Image: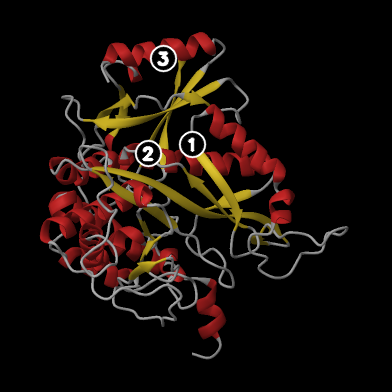
């Protein structure tokens, strides 16, 4: 969008919200965590004009917000600034803070005005380009699972539903229990109000497969970058609504050992230049279309080397275990939540793939970049997906992709396909950062070491 149009967006917003005092400029880092800075009113125009100075290393931080010693970005290069530019259409109010405040997503540019290649939005754009060159437009949406948590007697636990008429926790999973939604009705109302105010197209909410676990779906859009913008803003909105109600919200992949993990599911279809869904139709054997089968074949081919993106931190791999509806091999089939690439029940025009591998803790931009890479590879190379898992089939837990962090990073480093889409430089940067975080995490001595070993060893 031209700078003049961006300025018009800002002026229109300030006309409707003349009391606005601050503007929060937000950008997703390598982990998908939103970071940024708060600007005063006299500086708003910078974000909607030539750009506001932001530390370029903001996009390259670990899960604790620290820079990395093993890369030349941040401390070792003097931490230079880039330029943060407002993302069109992302300007909205921040209703949970005391002073009248707005927020806007920004994308990072180099000081010469060229796209900053380490901004996850630009990594996704790069991965999208091969499909664009084929005349294809992805239509996608994400589903995010999360827990509402409370701190009770010195430990974090899920926000447990209560037995009516008491403060006693209600046992059992109680999947899709409407009363569980009623118990957090104030949270859901606050979340709905935030999403409306910030133009986040959130849809259905469901009580998920564990006490205190919920899922919120986003509507499909025909812009993958925008779909991921919606995902990171929804995470922020959920955390804000939870805080307003005295709760925490977490998108950790596996916050509680005894409960289900949290996934980031991506629903995606492809439209041709005429707006026709190329996944619709049947193949020669009467099942799904050849192009859908090839797309799934490509997703399977890239699954192993993409696991470091789908599962980016130490906790991510706790989700990968039998019985959790978390696949560890490139299985696929219709209407089956145990496979990696599920074909949901839908009309021909809405035929799509649901990619079910990534955790809710993953960076949506990078997850979608890997998904688009797999689809393009499958279409361009006509990759066979292997046998389909029939509907209602009983399947075991087969592990053919790495489900431990160092092994996933090894597969990521050795992969020959994904770097063609995200770039070898970004592949190497991501690997070095994640390996350093893995080393730092494992250098800590957890309490369990004393529980298991102090007396006996």
Question: What is the total number of numbered labels drawn onto the structure image?
Answer: 3
Residue under pointer 2 = 221
First in residue order: circle 3 vs circle 2: 3
Q: Is residue 305 above or below residue 149?
A: below
Q: Is residue 62 visible?
A: no
Judge by depth and name the residue closer to the eye, 402 or 82: 402
Residue under pointer 1 = 201
Expressed as whole percent of the image width and height from the top left, the position of residue 97 reads 60, 28
Residue 197, quarter of the rendered image: top right
Residue 87, quarter of the rendered image: top left
- Asked whether the beta carbons under mark 3 and mark 2 sit within 8 Å of each other, the answer is no
- Asked whether the beta carbons under mark 1 and mark 2 sit within 8 Å of each other, the answer is yes
Q: Is residue 12 visible?
A: yes
Looking at the rendered structure, the secondary structure element under dot 2 is loop
Looking at the rendered structure, the secondary structure element under dot 3 is helix
Q: Please give the label number shown on residue 187.
A: none
Asked if residue 206 lies left or right of residue 430, the reply is right
Quadrant location of the N terminus in the rendered image: top left
Q: Residues within 10 Å of mark 1 (few under 14, many from 20)?
A: some
Asked if residue 426 lies left or right of residue 140, the reply is left
Residue under pointer 3 = 10
Judge by depth and name the residue closer to the eye, 52 or 184: 184
């Amino acid at each position: 969008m031209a700078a003049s149009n961006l300025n018009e967006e800002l002026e229109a917003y300030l006309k409707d919200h003349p009391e606005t005092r601050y503007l929060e400029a937000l950008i997703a880092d390598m982990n998908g965590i939103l970071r940024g800075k708060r600007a005063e009113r006299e500086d708003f125009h910078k974000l909607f004009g030539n750009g506001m100075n932001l530390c370029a290393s903001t996009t390259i931080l670990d899960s604790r917000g620290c820079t990395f010693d093993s890369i030349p970005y941040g401390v070792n290069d003097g931490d230079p600034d880039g330029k943060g530019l407002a993302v069109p259409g992302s300007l909205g109010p921040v209703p949970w803070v005391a002073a009248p405040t707005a927020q806007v997503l920004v994308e990072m540019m180099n000081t010469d005005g060229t796209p900053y290649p380490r901004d996850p939005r630009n990594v996704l754009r790069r991965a999208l380009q091969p499909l664009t060159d084929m005349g294809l437009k992805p239509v996608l949406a994400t589903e995010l699972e999360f827990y509402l948590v409370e701190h009770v007697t010195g430990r974090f636990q899920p926000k447990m539903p209560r037995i009516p008429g008491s403060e006693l926790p209600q046992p059992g999973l109680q999947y899709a229990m409407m009363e569980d939604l009623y118990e957090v009705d104030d949270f859901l109302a606050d979340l709905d109000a935030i999403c409306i105010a910030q133009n986040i197209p959130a849809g259905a909410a469901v009580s998920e497969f564990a006490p205190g676990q919920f899922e919120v779906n986003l509507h499909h859009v025909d812009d993958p970058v925008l779909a991921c913008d919606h995902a990171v803003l929804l995470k922020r909105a959920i955390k804000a609504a939870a805080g307003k109600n005295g709760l925490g919200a977490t998108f950790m992949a596996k916050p509680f050992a005894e409960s289900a993990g949290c996934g980031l599911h991506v629903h995606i279809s492809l439209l041709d230049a005429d707006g026709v869904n190329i996944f619709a139709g049947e193949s020669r054997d009467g099942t799904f279309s050849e192009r859908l089968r090839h797309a799934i074949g490509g997703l399977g081919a890239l699954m192993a080397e993409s696991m470091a993106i789908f599962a980016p931190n130490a906790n991510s791999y706790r989700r990968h275990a039998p019985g959790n509806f978390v696949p560890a091999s490139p299985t696929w089939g219709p209407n089956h939540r145990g496979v990696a690439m599920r074909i949901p029940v839908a009309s021909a025009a809405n035929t799509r793939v649901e990619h079910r591998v990534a955790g809710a803790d993953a960076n949506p931009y990078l997850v979608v970049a890997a998904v688009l890479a797999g689809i393009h590879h499958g279409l361009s190379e006509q990759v066979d997906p292997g046998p389909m898992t029939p509907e209602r089939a009983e399947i075991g837990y087969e592990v053919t992709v790495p489900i431990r962090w160092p092994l996933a990073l090894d597969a990521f480093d050795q992969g020959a396909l994904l770097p063609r889409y995200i770039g070898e430089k970004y592949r190497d940067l991501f690997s070095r950062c994640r390996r350093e975080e893995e080393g730092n995490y494992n250098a800590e001595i957890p309490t369990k070491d004393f529980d298991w070993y102090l007396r006996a060893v």
